[in-house]
Image: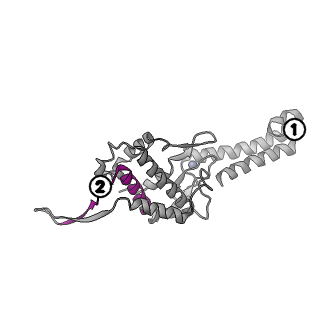
């Protein structure tokens, strides 16, 4: 069975929008409905008391519960990637790691389980579990997401968690191999292109300034300014990811 990375999948519902902004896949209940259904396999047992994950429909309470768990997860991911930088999407706006752990534990406790013995006539006994009480769909979602997050954070894959350092990217990812730098190849391509353009702009601005001072105006005036603009651009990317 594949490793349980549901918590990472939850975290990356906060993503860059392809420009300079942040998009949120969980901005409305429909977003959570789609996300849960897309993860119906891994959530099947958790949401069985609510009729399963494949036919799950989120309401406002379930959305609020899921977003609260996601905020806690992102705060704990920011701690997990230390001493590396966190995702820039919400750094500085997250609860402390201690507060986040409290929220995660409170969410997990919204659905208590009792152990259960199953012993059919023709088979060996097995230990099962029964949901105690009558949890709401929001309780089930919150508890399920929290349990998967606890499993991830206490498992071996936490040490390979990283925040992608590519320009504009705000994703967390689990490194598949030691040399992996980016969450996906397109981020590596974008980072290389950005570096190339930064170098190219600096060179072009210096040449343009030398030939005709006006031509370099768009990228920052004279040769010294062009170099400065390039440096500032690199600094902007770093600041955005920091
Ligand atoms: Zn990335």
Query: Disc 1 or disc 2, which is closer to the eye?
Result: 2
Tell me whether circle 1 and circle 2 mark residues in contact (CB < 8 Å): no
Quadrant of the snapshot with the N terminus: bottom left
Q: Is residue 57 above or below residue 117?
A: above
Determine the image quadrant of residue 212: top right
Q: Residue 112: percent from the left, percent from the top?
A: 33, 62
Q: Does any atom of ligand 1 lie closer than 8 Å to the CB of label 2?
A: no
The answer to whether residue 5 is left or right of residue 51 is right
Residue extending farthest to the left is 121
Label 1 – label 2 distance at C-alpha: 73 Å
Q: Is residue 147 above or below residue 166?
A: below
Range shown magenta = 125-150
As for residue 140 lying within the magenta part, the answer is yes
Q: Could you classify mark 2 by the number of other residues whose Cα lies within 10 Å: few (under 14), some (14-19), or many (20 or more)? A: few
Residue at image mark 2? 134
Whether residue 175 is visible here, answered yes or no, is no
Q: What kind of element bears circle 1?
A: helix
As for residue 80 lying within the magenta part, the answer is no
Between residue 131 and residue 79, name the one nearer to us.
131
Q: Earlier in the sequence, mark 1 or mark 2?
A: 2
Q: Which residue is found at the position 70% from the left and 44% from the top?
A: 196
Quadrant of the snapshot with the C terminus: bottom right
Q: Is residue 25 above or below residue 113?
A: above
Q: Residue 187: percent from the left, percent from the top?
A: 58, 46
């Amino acid at each position: 069975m594949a490793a349980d990375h549901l918590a990472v999948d939850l975290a990356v519902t906060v993503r860059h929008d392809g420009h300079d902004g942040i998009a949120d896949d969980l901005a409305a209940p429909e977003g959570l409905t789609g996300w849960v259904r897309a993860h119906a396999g891994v959530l099947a047992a958790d949401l069985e008391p609510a009729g399963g994950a494949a036919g799950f429909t989120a309401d406002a309470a379930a959305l609020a519960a899921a977003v609260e768990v996601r905020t806690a997860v992102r705060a704990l991911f920011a701690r997990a990637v230390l001493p590396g930088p966190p995702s820039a999407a919400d750094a500085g706006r997250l609860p402390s790691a201690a507060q986040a752990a409290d929220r995660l534990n409170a969410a997990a406790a919204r659905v208590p389980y009792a152990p259960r013995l199953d012993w059919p006539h023709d088979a060996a006994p097995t230990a099962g579990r029964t949901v105690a009480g009558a949890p709401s769909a929001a309780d089930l979602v919150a508890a399920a997401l929290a349990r998967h997050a606890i499993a991830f954070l206490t498992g071996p894959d936490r040490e390979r968690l990283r925040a992608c350092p590519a320009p504009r990217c705000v994703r967390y990812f689990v490194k598949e191999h030691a040399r992996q730098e980016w969450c996906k190849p397109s981020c590596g391509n974008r980072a290389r292109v950005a570096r190339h353009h930064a170098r190219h702009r600096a060179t072009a601005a210096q040449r343009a300034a030398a030939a005709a001072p006006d031509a370099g105006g768009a990228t920052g005036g004279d040769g010294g300014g062009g170099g400065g603009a390039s440096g500032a651009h690199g600094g902007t990317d770093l600041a955005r990811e920091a």
